Image (cartoon, rainbow, N blue to C red):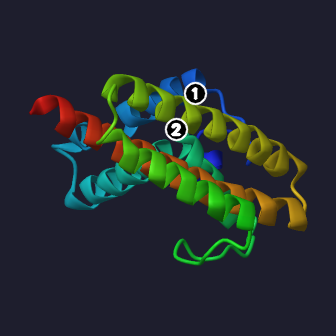
């Protein structure tokens, strides 16, 4: 049984998050290990395993990037490793530009404005990639899944850069 099936969803990218939360809470109430405190050790073990499986499924499906990754794995789409370099030269150039913008934040005359501008760039780039990836996942062909995987890797780069920007902002304003 895959993670989508646990919640009664078809294996597709679009998931109703509110419904996911409700189903998660309902399922966890049924199998929570505390309900089996006085049961046999075998039943307790089964409850822990079910609870862990439901939790893992929920954590994977509630996050769009991990959901996309899981969906591509279910589709057995060959994806390059996270460490593989991008063959998209324009994206490589974009990565360098964004890293330079991050470095420039430290030395900006108006740090708040520099943070705002970089954050805006990251949000815009992420939104465009996310929309494209979602369409590619919906198409669900061998080639569209490969492209979706490539865009997923790009989205992970954007997410990591946003985390780096958040850390830098904390450092700059905590001093």
- Judged from the image, the secondary structure of the residue bearing numbered disc 2 is helix
Count the numbered circles shown: 2
CA–CA distance in space, label 2 to label 1: 7 Å
Left or right? Give the position of 36 relative to 128.
Answer: left
Residue at 68% x, 73% y is 79
What residue sits right under mark 1 in the picture? 17
What residue sits right under mark 2 in the picture? 62
Between 23 and 47, the one lying in front of the other is 23
Residue at 53% x, 48% y is 158
Residue 163, percent from left and from top: 37, 44
Q: Is residue 156 above or below residue 162?
A: below
Instruction: Quadrant for the N terminus, please.
Output: bottom right
Q: Quadrant of residue 154?
A: bottom right
Residue 151, percent from left and from top: 70, 55
- Judged from the image, the secondary structure of the residue bearing numbered disc 1 is helix
Left or right? Give the position of 101 relative to 144.
Answer: left
Residue 140, percent from left and from top: 86, 55
For disc 1, the neighbor class at 10 Å (few under 14, some 14 to 19, many from 20) is few
Give the residue at the far left of this rendering: 175
Callout 2 touching callout 1 (CB < 8 Å): yes
Residue 128, percent from left and from top: 72, 38
Q: Quadrant of residue 115?
A: top left
Residue at 72% x, 73% y is 87
Between 125 and 89, the one lying in front of the other is 89
Question: Can residue 139 be seen in this snapshot?
Answer: yes
For disc 2, the neighbor class at 10 Å (few under 14, some 14 to 19, many from 20) is some
Task: Identify the mark nearer the N-term, 2 or 1.
Answer: 1
Q: Is residue 142 above or below residue 5?
A: below
């Amino acid at each position: 049984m895959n993670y989508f099936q646990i919640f009664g969803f078809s294996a597709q990218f679009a998931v109703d998050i509110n419904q996911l939360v409700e189903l998660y809470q309902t399922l966890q109430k049924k199998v929570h290990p505390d309900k089996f405190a006085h049961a046999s050790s075998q039943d307790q073990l089964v409850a822990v395993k079910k609870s862990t499986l439901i939790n893992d499924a929920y954590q994977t499906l509630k996050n769009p990037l991990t959901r996309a990754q899981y969906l591509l794995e279910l589709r057995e789409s060959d994806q390059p490793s996270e460490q593989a370099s991008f063959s998209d030269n324009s994206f490589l150039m974009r990565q360098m530009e964004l890293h330079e913008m991050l470095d420039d934040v430290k030395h900006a005359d108006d740090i708040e404005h520099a943070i705002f501008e970089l954050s805006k760039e990251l949000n815009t780039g992420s939104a465009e990639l996310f929309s494209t990836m979602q369409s590619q996942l919906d198409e669900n062909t061998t080639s569209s899944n490969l492209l979706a995987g490539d865009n997923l890797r790009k989205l992970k780069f954007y997410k990591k850069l946003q985390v780096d920007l958040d850390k830098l902002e904390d450092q700059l304003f905590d001093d």
